Amino acid sequence: MRGDILKITVDKFTFLVPAGLFYSEAGVWVKLEGNRARLGLTDFAQQSSGDAAFANVKPVGTSLQLGDEFADIETVKVNVSFPSPLRGTIAEVNSSLAEAAEVLNQDPYGTGWVAVVELSDWESDRVHLLDAQAYLALVKNQAEAEMKK
């Protein structure tokens, strides 16, 4: 992972948000790669969910609409479904997650990527995504709200 990394600390938790990626409000990062996009879970999403025990990703060839579940993660704390921030078709799945779901926690922006999607309409879908600064502000608000519970 190259580029600037924004970070915010709330209480004793530090969350990393790489610049140059796009983000959904649900905690999915998007890295544009030509006519495809690599998807993964943000540092905030993985820390909030807990240690990943199992990761289930929809298979290659699955057609996605905005909001369709593309992955669900089972942790010691919760089961979390992640909605697709893009329309397209799953072209690749990170097969290492089947044997080692913990890579989602260890390297969320690197080897812990989840899927690659062949994009249907990037220009339309992009308007629903946040840049790093906007996602950092969202993380700050969500983390502070969690601390008050």
Image (cartoon, rainbow, N blue to C red):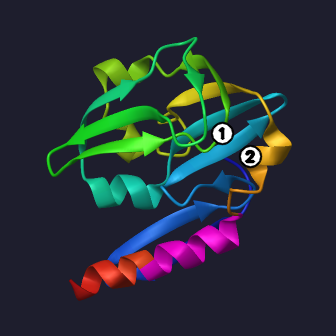
Q: Name the residue under label 2.
A: 125
Q: What residue type is labelled 2?
A: Asp
Find out whether the residues at labels 1 and 2 contact each other: C-beta distance under 8 Å: yes
Secondary structure beneath label 2: helix
Q: Which of marks 1 and 2 is nearer the N terminus?
A: 1
What secondary structure prevails in the magenta region?
Answer: helix
Mark carried by residue 86: 1
Q: Where is residue 21 in the image (x, y as percent from the top left)?
A: 70, 53
Image coordinates of residue 17 in percent, x first then y, are 58, 63
Q: How crowded is mark 2: few (under 14 residues within 10 Å), some or many (20 or more)?
A: some
Q: In this view, does 146 lie above or below 79?
A: below
In this picture, residue 7 sits left or right of residue 86: left
- Which residue is at 74% across, 46% downward? 125
Instruction: Please identify the quarter of the rendering in which residue 57 is found.
Output: top left
The range drawn in magenta is 131-141
Q: Residue at x 52, y 64 (%)?
A: 16
